């Protein structure tokens, strides 16, 4: 899936989390306790995805991508992702900070739901940027449970009407708002697993990373000024 020609030198940058520094010459100051991401915007649904390596918090663009985001929510609400895995880590050549990780139920007949229609990025207005959540597919209209998270911007995954052949890209439907550190931990794990699809050779995690549970996040009202 990763095409080296699509990697633009210097175009990708990872922003380190801010740190607090104090020196002996600096008077101690009150530090506010850490807080999570702000409440989601209208038309967005937040989901907590708990893995064996930590929590990934995802905002689903239900208003912009109702078919794909709604499909993901069905898996969440029916607890079908509980016990699933992140099974793939696709890294760009000679890179540990650009690629994608993929998870889902992998066509488990006890958990997989019917395929959904394709929602291209030209329709939703969403893009495959760092932290984007998108749905895996073969031909358009074959997507079920398996999703991936981008590490770094990946415009070549967007729909491109000017491109030849299947130019509909992948259906982006959300983004990570907390837990990209967990995503990056998964990206660099060993991938000696056997690939059923030759395209994924050298990208299969062994062992895979368990998804312990996926739940809608509790709704927290936005703080108001006094």
Image (cartoon, rainbow, N blue to C red):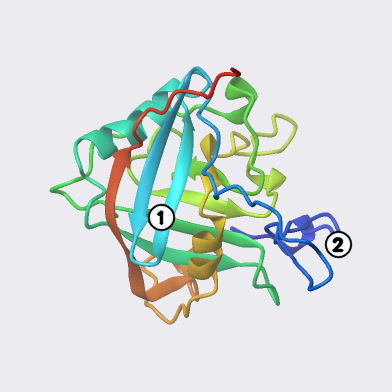
Query: Looking at the image, which residue is at 36% across and 36% down?
Result: 217
Do the residues under discs 2 and 1 have CB atoms within 8 angstroms? no
Nearer to us in this view, 68 or 183: 183
Residue 55 shown left or right of residue 114 in the figure: right
Which quadrant: the C terminus?
Answer: top right
User: At which x and y percent is residue 57?
Assistant: 45, 45
What residue did someone put label 1 on?
Answer: 55
Labels 2 and 1: the sequence-earlier one: 2
Q: Would you say 213 lies left or right of 159 here?
A: left
Q: Can residue 146 be seen in this view?
A: yes
Which residue is located at x 63 percent, y 44 percent?
Answer: 157
Residue 221 screen position, x and y as percent: 44, 23
Residue 135 visible? The answer is: no
Q: Position of residue 153 (x, y in %)?
A: 70, 49
Q: Is residue 107 above or below residue 70?
A: below
The local crowd at label 2, few if under 14, some if 14 to 19, many if 20 or more residues have their Cα within 10 Å, is: few
Q: Which of 37 and 181 is in front in this view?
A: 37
CA gap, disc 2 and disc 1: 31 Å
Circle 1 sits in a helix, a strand or a loop, which is it? strand
Q: Quadrant of residue 102?
A: bottom left
Q: Which of 151 and 214 is in front in this view?
A: 214
In the rendered image, the vertical position of residue 157 relative to residue 209, given as above or below: above
The tag on residue 9 is 2
Occupied quadrant, residue 128? top right
Question: Residue at position x 23%, y 37% from top?
Answer: 113
In terms of depth relative to the viewer, which is nearer, 219 or 99?
219
Q: What element carries label 2?
A: loop
Mark nearer the viewer, 2 or 1: 1
Q: In this view, does 136 lie above or below 193?
A: above
């Amino acid at each position: 899936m990763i095409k080296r020609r699509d990697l633009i030198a210097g175009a990708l940058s990872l922003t380190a989390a801010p740190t607090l520094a104090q020196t002996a010459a600096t008077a101690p100051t009150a530090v506010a306790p850490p807080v999570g991401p702000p409440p989601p915007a209208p038309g967005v649904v937040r989901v907590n995805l708990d893995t064996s390596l930590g929590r990934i918090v995802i905002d689903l663009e239900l208003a912009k991508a109702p078919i794909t985001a709604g499909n993901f929510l069905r898996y969440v609400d029916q607890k079908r992702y509980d016990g699933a895995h992140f099974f793939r880590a696709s890294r760009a050549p000679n890179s540990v900070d650009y690629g994608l990780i993929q998870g889902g139920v992998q066509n488990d007949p006890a958990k997989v739901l019917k395929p959904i229609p394709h929602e291209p990025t030209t329709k939703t207005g969403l893009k495959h940027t760092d932290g984007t959540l998108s749905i895996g597919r073969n031909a358009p209209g074959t997507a079920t449970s398996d999703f991936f998270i981008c590490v770094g911007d990946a415009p070549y995954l967007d729909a491109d009407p000017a491109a030849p052949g299947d130019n509909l890209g992948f259906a982006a439907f959300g983004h990570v708002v907390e837990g990209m550190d967990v995503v990056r931990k998964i990206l660099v794990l060993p991938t000696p697993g056997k690939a059923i699809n030759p395209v994924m050779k050298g990208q299969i995690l062994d062992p895979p990373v368990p998804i312990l549970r996926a739940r809608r996040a509790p709704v927290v009202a936005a703080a108001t000024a006094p």
